[in-house]
Amino acid sequence: MNKYFTRYFIETPNSVGNRKDIELCKIFGWKFNLGNNEISLCDCKEGLFSDCYIEADSLNGAEDKSRAFIENILNLIDFSTSSASATPQFINIYDASPNLLGREYKQVFYIPIREKNVVVINEDFFGKLFNLFDKNKDRRIVRAISWLRKGYLERKDVDKFIAFWAGLESINELLCDLFKIPSEERILKCKNCDKLLHPITAGIKKLFIDEIKIGGEGFKNIKGMRAKLLHGGGPLDNDFVNKIKEYNPIVKKSLIVGLGKLLEMEEKDIDKINQQKSKLYNETIRFIIKANLVSFEPPEISEFSKQPKIDLIEENLLNRIIDDQGRLSLKSKMTLKSNASFNNITYEVWNEDNTCITSIKIDEI
């Protein structure tokens, strides 16, 4: 088991010191000891930084483990202050095991694109959809579409799942009517007293099995994840989250198909919506540096400024090209500065899965 250092940034109204302390750049912080793991929180003008020393088998394992620790602490802080913190944003990580000549290092820069995404609205397609909706203005359909949109906006897989499933539950009764499910099959009754216990998802089940073709066992597995998530039926570990990520496209597709059926859309139009990638207003490029950190001894966790880091001093857009289809290509130059010694430096550029950018090139570092 190795020891790793990780740093995260949290956009949050919560702080350890007051506003005046923060303005005067007085750094206040807390330290948490969780077994052999150390986690600290300290103020900055934009929110909080969290530094961690974590025992783990790998860089990726340490990144996941430290994020989970920080999320747990943030949840308790937000609960105690009735505030809302953003998801912790990973900054950097390195191998902090003792007596190493070189240390594996990774850092991520988040570079926002300075313009909005452009998704051209197909007037004919939207006109057909508008006319169909105008014939059926049931508020449950409106609510389900709102949940679908919320799912697009969410960044966490668990939150996406909740939003898409809530959309399905909004239209469950409408689906029961559509599929002509008898009223006695739409509810669950106590076998002993015949009292109504709770509604069941009869319409959603028929949608999944008959339209999405995932089978009864597949539906049972997905519904089981919903029950575990919303009713606390076990730990929400990495395996669970990975399963949620696997099921999200199916749940989203089911919601779109269900809405399409209720609006009496043509199959080809439902398929068209399902094949589209959702796009947000704008997006952020992740610039990832991997390197070998040399001649460095890890400081105490309280020594915030002594930790190794690479600063982005300047980023200039050199070229911006839009092709005939409206696709965007960018070329950029970056100037970096570090407070430690690195060699074997490599970099990667990642963008969103649903990006509007076709190519990104970093010309010079």
Image (cartoon, rainbow, N blue to C red):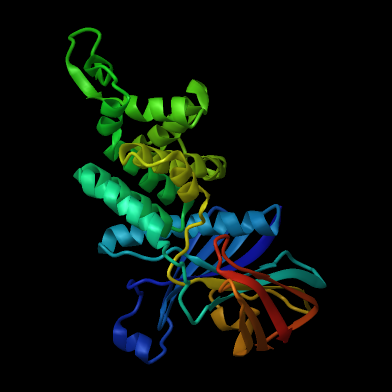
Q: Tell me which residue sits at (25%, 62%) in the image.
A: 82
Nearer the observer, 27 or 287: 287
The C terminus is located in which quarter? bottom right
What x and y, as percent, mark residue 81? 27, 64
- Asked where in the image residue 243 lies, by quadrant, the reply is top right
Q: Tell me which residue sits at (37%, 85%) in the image.
A: 22
What x and y, as percent, mark residue 180? 29, 21
Q: Tell me which residue sits at (66%, 87%) in the image.
A: 334
Q: Tell me which residue sits at (30%, 81%) in the image.
A: 18
What x and y, as percent, mark residue 273? 46, 50
Q: Is residue 102 left or right of residue 28?
A: right
Asked if residue 55 shows in the view, the reply is: no
Q: Is residue 287 left or right of residue 187?
A: right
- Asked where in the image residue 344 lies, by quadrant, the reply is bottom right
Residue lying farthest to the front in this orientation: 124
Q: In this view, does 162 lie to the left or right of 132?
A: right
Nearer the observer, 257 or 303: 257
Classify 222 as above or below 144: above
What x and y, as percent, mark residue 186? 26, 21
Nearer the observer, 206 or 189: 206
